[in-house]
Image (cartoon, rainbow, N blue to C red):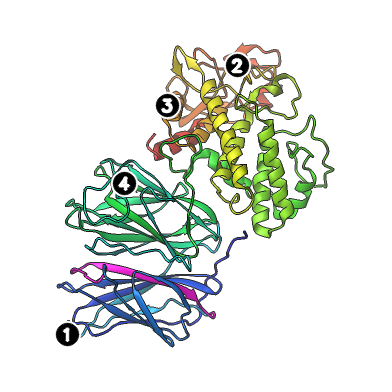
Amino acid sequence: MRPHKKTRNGAAFLGLCALANFSHAITCSTTADVWNSGYVLQVNVLNDSATPISNWSVELAFNQPPGISGSWNAELTTNGNITTASNISWNGNLAAGQSTSFGFQGTHEGNFVMPTCTGDSAGAGSSSSSSSSSTSSSSSSSSSSSSSSSSSSSSSSSSSSSSSSGSGSQIVIQEEAPGFCGVDGSIDNNNTGYTGAGFANTTNANGAAIRWSVASPYGSSYQLDWRYANGSSNPRTASIRVNGNTTGSVDFDTTGDWTSWTSSGVVVALEQGQNSIELVSTNSEGLANIDSLTVIGNQAEAADCPTTGGTGPVLPQDGNPAQRRFDNAKSAWSQSKADIILSHQFDNGGWPKNQEYDSTGSGGSGVGEATIDNGATVTEMVYLAQVYQNTGQTKYRDAVRKAMDYLLEAQYSSGGWPQFYPLTGGYHDHATFNDNAMASALTVLHNAVEKKSPFSGNIFSDSDRNAMKTAISGGVDYILKSQWRQNGVLTVWCAQHGAYDYAPKMARAYELESLSGSESVEIAAFLMTQPQTPAVETAVKAALAWFRSPNTILEDYRYDKNVEEKIVYSPGSRMWYRFYDLNTNRGFFSDRDSRKVYDLMQISEERRNGYSWGGDYGERLLSYAQSVGY
């Protein structure tokens, strides 16, 4: 399905929000998300007086019929251009300083401008203030950079609002229901007032999380509202992660008792396709007790929860080196080259490597040429999937499907991938991490399973994704089995390993059996895309310990390929060698005669200048690891 592109315009679509017939000061504010002929409006009502109120009502006056198709958290009536909203049973009681929110979606005739929301207070001594704002989300359906606008609503009632099944304007996801993916803690029912089977109670720990999965037919903004209770004396703040990226935060203020329930929420951008949503504690007390998540917006649906790689916490993906390579592939070439790239695809679904794609290709069998080396095939897959999303032309989708079939067919039963397929013999037949071949292939498979853009929509079927899950499971198993041990201690990986014996292998004459300071980065980074099962977490943390070891880091030096000596003194810099001895962790170099030497100047000038022997390889991985607490 093609993206639903949102637009912003600034013509006069003026709204007036007024409070009527109350003797208490009310502050009213609005937030909207707008696209071609539709909008979602969120209204926040704050009791800014010194006394509580038991009900409220507001009016919104538009200069055209509002065309409302769905609403939440308020009773609405419309007469011409005037919409009146009043509280429902559970959000009318507002203590001094408390707020509630409601919203609706509809269509407009163009010229949409944020409604101006004003409040009036008969007998309260002063008029209330008002404000309006618009979300800053990108018009691109793949954006995840929208700022989150927080709101809250208060209630001590045990009832919850139901979802609208007809219009699909909102869904309510409760524990142990489709779309609820897990809690770092337990599902409890010892505090009254919850709905459904119980409530999610996280462990009292920083980083404890609750996870959901939601599908969106378009890239758009959605309101997320959590019904919660916080009987502690302190507010509890959570960060919000969408598809592994932190998009904002939400406050869970104290409710005075664990049986008193209220709601709080934000507006976030969801991608077209499946989206993972995580609520993550930012303090040692954990989260509030969460009863349900309500998702409000255009045709949201509860989605299947990710199962790739087993069960375990999923790390945020901001800064993951493996994901950065994947994201860069979306725009590896200009869209004008799409048909040229299509013409180079082999009959078996693969592509050749190191192509500029300046002229039309002739396809062919791919024997001896189809490969995943140097990013071949996987880069073309991601790029053409993005072209398909941009154009809707099925020839690009079909090429991506054909390439995925190639990847699945090329995998060994052990879980590894050769460098070339069909097999060409020699070192090419080893399971190949060199130049990030396997890590890139597995990252593409992972993102396809997760329906991450550009693999959203109908590019792959559920049957396809199940086959990919099996391939990923095999790949993870191979990585774990091939991780090298020094005296029983896990370290990192060689650039290539035996397809079935998992042992480090030699490739070209100057690529000896070794530990790789380069390729091991994205192997570990790929593992960090997977659920952190005990086995995966152990492997990742062992690799990180190796990269952090003073026995592997060359402090105060950097690698400069433009100078003769290559390894240059540079206070404050750090570098890692390309190759390390399997047993001593000593960095070494080699030449076409396969000599192992420890001084770069002892190899030929041709090899010194024709190969990369070191770099700041570990920096990206260690920076990312630190950001996720590893």
Q: Earlier in the sequence, mark 3 or mark 1?
A: 1
Q: Residue at x 51, y 38 (%)?
A: 308
Secondary structure type for disc 1? loop
Quick check: 260 left or right of 390?
left
Q: Is residue 377 visible?
A: no
Q: Quadrant of the C terminus?
A: top left
**Other-residue count near label 4 (Cα within 10 Å), few / some / many at <14 / 14–19 / ≥20:** many
Using the numbered discs, state the Cα–Cα distance from disc 1 to disc 2 in whole angstroms: 83 Å
Quick check: 175 left or right of 382?
left
Please name which of the two marks, 4 or 2, marks the residue nearer to the observer.
2
Q: CB atoms at circles 1 and 2 under 8 Å apart?
A: no
- In the foreground, 92 or 232: 92
Q: Residue at x 47, y 59 (%)?
A: 269
Q: Which residue is mark 4?
A: 281
The kind of residue on which mark 3 rests is: Thr
Using the numbered discs, state the Cα–Cα distance from disc 3 to disc 1 in whole angstroms: 65 Å
The label on residue 538 is 3
User: Was residue 52 drawn as part of the magenta stretch in this picture?
Assistant: no
Relative image position of residue 457 (x, y in whole percent): 60, 54
Which image quadrant is residue 51 in? bottom left
Q: CB atoms at circles 2 and 3 under 8 Å apart?
A: no
Q: CB atoms at circles 3 and 4 under 8 Å apart?
A: no
Which region is colored magenta? 91-110
Secondary structure type for disc 2? loop
Relative image position of residue 139 (x, y in whole percent): 54, 64
The label on residue 123 is 1
Which image quadrant is residue 615 in? top right
The label on residue 186 is none
Q: Earlier in the sequence, mark 2 or mark 3?
A: 2
- In the foreground, 260 or 426: 260
The label on residue 501 is 2
The kind of residue on which mark 1 rests is: Gly
